[in-house]
Image: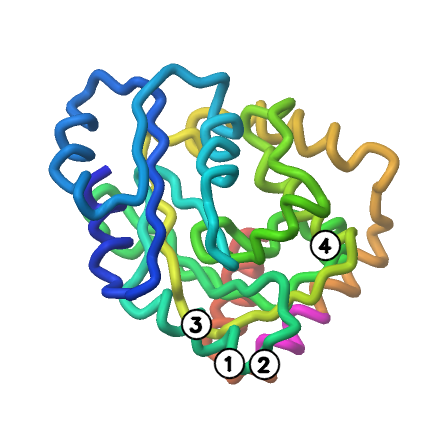
Amino acid sequence: MERTIRSVLDQGYPNLEYVIIDGGSTDGSLDIIRKYANRLAYWVSEPDQGQANAINKGLRLATGEWVAWQNSDDVFYEGAFSQLAQKTSQSPDADLIIGNMNLIDKNDVLLRDIKYVRPTYRSMLAEGMVLTNQSAFWKRRLHTEVGYLSEDFDCGFDFEWFLRILEYGISAVHVNSTWGGLRMHEETKTSNHQAVFVREYEKILQGRETSSLRKKYYKIRRMVLMLGQGNFSYVLRGLLRRSYLR
């Protein structure tokens, strides 16, 4: 948790409103939160009704124009907030701005870099998570217009949220810079609840299934956009990885 907190506070961003919602932890997290309490806009430690419920608590307290959430084990990278601010000035009509993301281990060692392109509703239907909360920011007004995270899901609430706002018809922008890190180890939800992820994704996509032809189209679209960004080695590594897996 402390790495997560420091990754936010060490951004040095002057207009930061940092809210921490803790689910009544008994693992020493409270001591860490209290250590930084004077730099937080608000914090609470109390039982909640699941991760989505806790995130919604924080989002409802937010007052800034742009919001995001970061999980307690994940991090923002240096310069992410300043790059976001710069992009909001360059793209005033944008509602959602995303960066790239790294998979990291418990010691912050890079496991894999993941690059994205501008997300769309149809690309998400075809390819799944074409963005991630670890490097995504959106305008707070979307929660007034579209609602909050669905608390019906334990693992797929982020997928459902991003799919919902993209379907709403927002303006999405991608910045080809790495903004966040998703930590992978044996205790993370991503590692331990794959069956739940699959079951919830299937429920979210029910009635919106995508043909194999359209899925191929969006893979090609992503590759072309990646090449347009100059990510030649990244695309090549992806092609070699798929060839190896076959």
Rounded to the nearest angstrom, the CA distance separating label 4 from label 3 is: 21 Å
The residue that disc 1 covers is: 232
Secondary structure category for the residue under label 2: helix
Q: Which mark is residue 224?
A: none
- For badge 2, the amino acid type reads Leu
- Mark nearer the N terminus (1 vs 3): 3
Q: Is residue 139 left or right of residue 40?
A: right
Q: Which mark is residue 227?
A: 2
- Mark nearer the N terminus (1 vs 2): 2
Secondary structure category for the residue under label 4: helix
Q: In the rendered structure, which segment of residues is drawn in magenta?
A: 221-226
Task: Check contact, mark 1 vs mark 2: CB within 8 A.
Answer: yes
- Mark nearer the N terminus (3 vs 2): 3
Secondary structure category for the residue under label 1: helix
Q: Nearer the viewer, mark 1 or mark 3?
A: 3
Q: Nearer the viewer, mark 4 or mark 2?
A: 4
Sort mark 2 into few (<14), some (14-19) or many (20+) by Cα contacts within 10 Å. Answer: some
**Was residue 222 drawn as part of the magenta stretch in this picture?**
yes
Rounded to the nearest angstrom, the CA distance separating label 1 from label 3 is: 28 Å
Q: Residue sitting at 43 percent across and 29 percent down?
A: 189
The residue that disc 4 covers is: 166
- For badge 1, the amino acid type reads Phe
Q: Residue sitting at 60 percent across and 75 percent down?
A: 92
Q: Nearer the viewer, mark 3 or mark 2?
A: 3
Q: x%, y% of residue 67?
A: 49, 52
The residue that disc 3 covers is: 85
Sort mark 1 into few (<14), some (14-19) or many (20+) by Cα contacts within 10 Å. Answer: few
In front of the other: 30 or 207: 30
Q: Nearer the viewer, mark 1 or mark 4?
A: 4
Q: x%, y% of residue 141?
A: 62, 52
Q: x%, y% of residue 143?
A: 63, 45
Rounded to the nearest angstrom, the CA distance separating label 1 from label 2 is: 6 Å
